[in-house]
Amino acid sequence: MRELNRLSEEITHILAAGEVVERPASCLKEVIENSIDAGASLIDIKLEKGGIKKIEVYDNGKGIHSDDIEYVFERHTTSKIKSVDDIFKITTMGFRGEALCAISSVSKVTLISRHYEQEQGCKVEVEGGKVLSKTIYPFEKGTRITIEDLFYNTPARLKFLKSPSAEQKYCIEVVEKIAICYPEISFRMQVDNKRQLFTPGDSKVESAIASVFGSEILKNLIDFSHQEEGLKVWGFFVNPVLSKSTRSGYHFYVNRRFIRSKLLSTCIDEAFKNSILTGRFPIVFLFIEINPIDIDVNVHPAKLEIKFKDERYVYNTVYKTVSSTLQSEKMIPKPTLDNLYLPQSVQDVKMVRNLWSYTQEQQSKEKAFQEDFNEFLKIEEQLDFSKVEVGKESKDVITVFSEEFNVETYKIVGYAFDTYIIVQKEDSLYLIDQHAVHERRLFELLKEEIFRNKIQRQILLSPIVIELPISQKEFALENVHIFEKLGFEIDDFGKNEIVVRTYPLLFEGAVDKFFILDIIEMIYNESVEKGITHFSEELLKKIACRAAVKGNMNISDLEKEEIVKLVLVEKKIFNCPHGRPVVIEIQKREIEKMFKRIV
């Protein structure tokens, strides 16, 4: 007796719909992609109850010919693929020809369209995958599709949808993601008769980003770009001072298709590892343009994942492009009245912006802000920034360092709070954080010397005897090789003491009993938590931070000049290992605005 049954066409359509129609957002995505392929410059979207009750999309594209309009609801009907070879060089958003068939099998669909070569439009009504009617219909150029009562005939699927507000959120995210990579299209979106989104369609990616994420993100965008044979990488990331607690700020586009990619996520994580606060993630808009034959877009039912033919090549190119930009002078913040204090969150940015809104009610706040800023720039002696010269001794040192570092180009004009070096160049002031610069410098040098196993040691004239808890002493003596690799030579000194005979030359001036105690404790804690077979970057960051010159610690003129050289002349350091900025630029014009010299 036969046990296999051939499923009916109705059931196969519903089952196939499960691959494409997961929720209202997936319906919306498919329909918008069809509008893009139709050459639309305007896409108007309306939702009711998160798209569960109704999704309506109008576009001014080329339209659907009346001879084809009912066939769009049949399975695998497409104009995008004509041969097997076409599958491997997809350049359009939709190409399988199953979207409308799947959507119509689990909803009630009304499609009205007028092809650009025809004088009359055509209207088709479909319910449960069956065409109910087809009529001539007066209509402007383009297409309007209305999807109602999603999953009306599959209540089990309907039950697993989330609340209308949650489904609405997913739909909005779909439109936002697509709008960013198609800035030449004006997207308009209404949700329950309230305007939710509008993009100008001016072909500028920055305009689309600003429309979706707001002006504060726009102000902090930093562009990057690199092109090699068969591959172009470009886009923007937001200055790491504005970051997120999750990777939700990762926006990846390949050939203008939004994707999810573990490969690219890992790449961005690595590129920003030493340029962003630990536990935070950047906001990145990454665009990759690649030959279609070098990718496979057909590996995911919803086309949200792709496969690169040469993943290593793509990874290395993206990493090199982003990381080189992170080490460029583009990273020097240029505070204005809106972001002078380099806020750590969008909320802080809004606070500072509101503080500087020039209204009668906020005059007292503005005055207090000016006083705070004046205090921030206070130096030991009152200096005329336009006339002050660096002392003779400092001049000699500066000219030795580099021909570029000229006293007429950069002037160290002050030193605030024994922490911030104040440098003047033309119409700009630079405030440099001495601890952040030194910390980054030590981190990079330490990492390089350990990697090459060439740590330089200095013998202590008087070995340091240190008393430790028994557990830490035993750990230190059992792991002598680890401490030796870092530059410390240690021996047992009886009871619960050890003796330290050498230290890494990099840490000269910082080494004392308490410093070594801290280093031993850091390595011990790392071992307890994770086990230690090598020095992790996180551990090296902590060690560099501990060894670096601190804030409120007066340093010599020679050290100040070396720090200025690293940051402003050689342009080698723009962030500490934890991602904090090391320098900010304040233009003369902004200072004059604060003192009301100009408006």
Image (cartoon, rainbow, N blue to C red):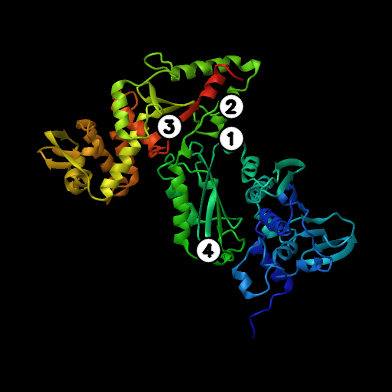
Residue holding disc 4: 307
Q: How far apart are marks 3 and 2 (CA)?
A: 21 Å
Q: Residue 590 location, x and y as percent?
A: 54, 24
Q: Residue 480 location, x and y as percent?
A: 17, 46
Q: Which amino acid type is shown beneath numbered disc 4?
A: Lys
**Picture quarter containing residue 377?**
top left
Q: Residue 366 location, x and y as percent?
A: 57, 17
Q: Which amino acid type is shown beneath numbered disc 1?
A: Glu
Q: Distance between the residues labelled 4 and 2?
A: 44 Å
- Mark closer to the chain start, 4 or 2: 4
Q: What element carries label 3?
A: strand
Q: Nearer the viewer, residue 109 or 293?
A: 293
**Picture quarter containing residue 206?**
top right
Observer-side mark, 1 or 3, equals 3
Q: Which amino acid type is shown beneath numbered disc 2?
A: Arg
Q: How crowded is mark 3: few (under 14 residues within 10 Å), some or many (20 or more)?
A: many
Q: What element carries label 1?
A: helix
Q: How far apart are marks 4 and 1 (CA)?
A: 34 Å
Residue holding disc 1: 216
Residue holding disc 2: 353
Q: How far apart are marks 1 and 2 (CA)?
A: 10 Å
